[in-house]
Image (cartoon, helix red, strand yellow):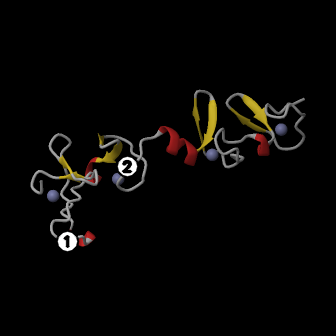
Amino acid sequence: MVICFTCNKRIEGQVLTALDKTYHPEHFVCEKCKKPICDNKFRTHDGRAYCEEDYNRMFVAQCFGCGQSISGKFISALGHDWHEEHFLCSCASKTTSQANKCKSAISAKVFSVSSDNEPICEKCS
Ligand SMILES: [Zn+2]
Ligand SMILES: [Zn+2]
Ligand SMILES: [Zn+2]
Ligand SMILES: [Zn+2]
């Protein structure tokens, strides 16, 4: 007899095995959003299962510039994490137009911070 780890009831039909436990497929849920993780694309943290989305949001550094998760080298600055290539000068010189922003990549060590708490490269500061 197979017992579901979540509801402690007997499983008839499909059994989902994950983390050395057995579940009704609809009872193997993400620890955070409580949605069933049925496509097996889950991640674990401290023995708990999370859907990929929540795992990335909670445990993986995300680039403040592009919103994507960061694997490998990144810059931590101004209370956020950034891909090296996305930590850019936000100086808009004399205009407020996005197109005219300097957008130079900023090396981690040398930059200034604007009144809006945005990074400014050496050249623009
Ligand atoms: Zn169950
Ligand atoms: Zn989730
Ligand atoms: Zn990025
Ligand atoms: Zn600049």
Where 121 falls versus 15 (above or below)? below
Q: As drawn, is 94 to the left or to the right of 73?
A: left
Query: Residue 95, which numbered label?
Result: 1
Residue at the spot 88% in from the left edge and 37% down from the top edge:
11
Residue at the spot 90% in from the left edge and 29% down from the top edge:
1
Location of residue 78 in the rendering, given as x and y in whole percent from the top left corner: 30, 43
Q: Amino acid at mark 2?
A: Cys
Label 1 sits on a secondary structure element that is: loop
Location of residue 117 in the rendering, given as x and y in whole percent from the top left corner: 28, 50
Find out if the beta carbon at label 1 lies less than 8 Å from the nearest ligand 4 atom.
Answer: no
Q: Amino acid at mark 1?
A: Thr
Q: Quick one: label 2, few (<14), some, or many (20+) residues within 10 Å? A: many
Question: Which sits earlier in the primary sequence, circle 2 or circle 1?
Answer: 2
Q: As drawn, is 12 to the left or to the right of 101?
A: right
Q: Quadrant of residue 29?
A: top right
Q: How many marks?
A: 2
Query: Residue 75, which numbered label?
Result: none
Residue at the spot 87% in from the left edge and 43% down from the top edge:
13
Q: Which residue is mark 2?
A: 63
Location of residue 89 in the rendering, given as x and y in whole percent from the top left corner: 21, 56
Q: As drawn, is 110 to the left or to the right of 46?
A: left
Q: Quick one: label 1, few (<14), some, or many (20+) residues within 10 Å? A: few
Instruction: Tell us which disc is closer to us: 2 or 1.
Output: 1
Find out if the beta carbon at label 2 lies less than 8 Å from the nearest ligand 3 atom.
Answer: yes
| Residue at the extreme front of the image, as rendered | 115
Label 2 sits on a secondary structure element that is: loop
- Given residues 78 and 70, the one toward you in this image is 78
Residue at the spot 15% in from the left edge and 69% down from the top edge:
94
Q: Quadrant of ligand 1?
A: top right
- Given residues 17 and 32, the one toward you in this image is 32
